[in-house]
Image (cartoon, grey):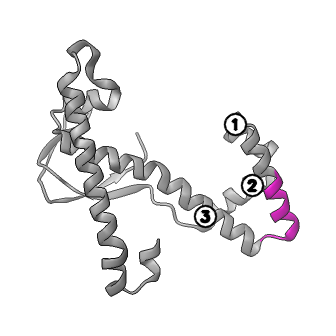
Amino acid sequence: AKDAVLPRFLSLPLVLWPTQKKRERLEKELANRIKLSWDTASSDQFKNGPWMKVFNENKFTPEEAAILVVGLMFAAHKNPSIGAAQSFCFLHDLGSKYELEAARIESRLVLEKPECNASLLRTRAPTLFRCVLETTRLTSHTLGAIRYVQKTIMLETEGNTSYLIHKGETIAISHISS
């Protein structure tokens, strides 16, 4: 988010390029660890979890697997973090002092009781629940992603339709499963 508030000539060398280098170092280290794991795992033990099994079955290289793992880790925290920040800003800017204090109390309650899932949030933390609903209503949340294809691949649907996607093409991916 820092890069969004800086002019381009500052955000590229001060934020985006260093972040890219860190990501590339992380992907390289992770690829080495994945390769070591694959080289030492027995075939019946294969390969340390469901993602590694899928990567191996689809003949991903350790480098390709590492890129996907880092992307999945980023996505797993990015969207909830953005939603939480938007909810906080909404509540802080537009909520009353009472609502802000109620949200603080409810937040402590939710943190103390990890069994408080989404269905219990409505009753245990009604202010937070209303805030999340209103934030979702007022902000745009993408239901997909746009990615550059890293290698040519053939995708097949359940109806036996095939799509050849070439390396370097841009694709849109829906987050909604059918």
Say what amino acid the circle numbered 2 marks: Leu
Q: Secondary structure at mark 3?
A: helix
Q: CA distance from mark 1 to mark 2?
A: 15 Å
**Which residue: 47% across, 71% down?**
1
Please give the residue where the numbered disc 1 appears in the rendered image.
114
Asked whether, in this view, residue 124 is left or right of residue 158, the answer is right
Q: Is residue 137 visible?
A: no
Q: In the rendered view of the protein, which quadrant contains the C terminus?
A: top left
What's the magenta bit mostly, secondary-structure-wise?
helix
Question: Residue 33, relative to residue 166: is it above or below?
Answer: above
Q: Is residue 94 magenta?
A: no
Do we see residue 127 in this rendering?
yes
Q: Nearer the viewer, residue 49 or 96?
A: 49
Q: Residues within 10 Å of mark 3 (few under 14, many from 20)?
A: few
* Residue at horizontal 41 percent and vertical 76 percent from the top: 3
Does residue 42 sit above or below 127 in this rendering? above
Q: Quadrant of residue 117?
A: top right
Answer whether labels 3 and 2 touch (C-beta < 8 Å).
no
Q: Earlier in the sequence, mark 3 or mark 2?
A: 3
Nearest to the eye among marks 1 and 2: give it. 1
**In the rendering, at what x and y percent does residue 46 appear?**
26, 20
Q: Amino acid at mark 3?
A: Ala
Of callouts 1 and 2, which one flags the residue occurring earlier in the amino acid sequence? 1
Q: Which mark is residue 128?
A: 2
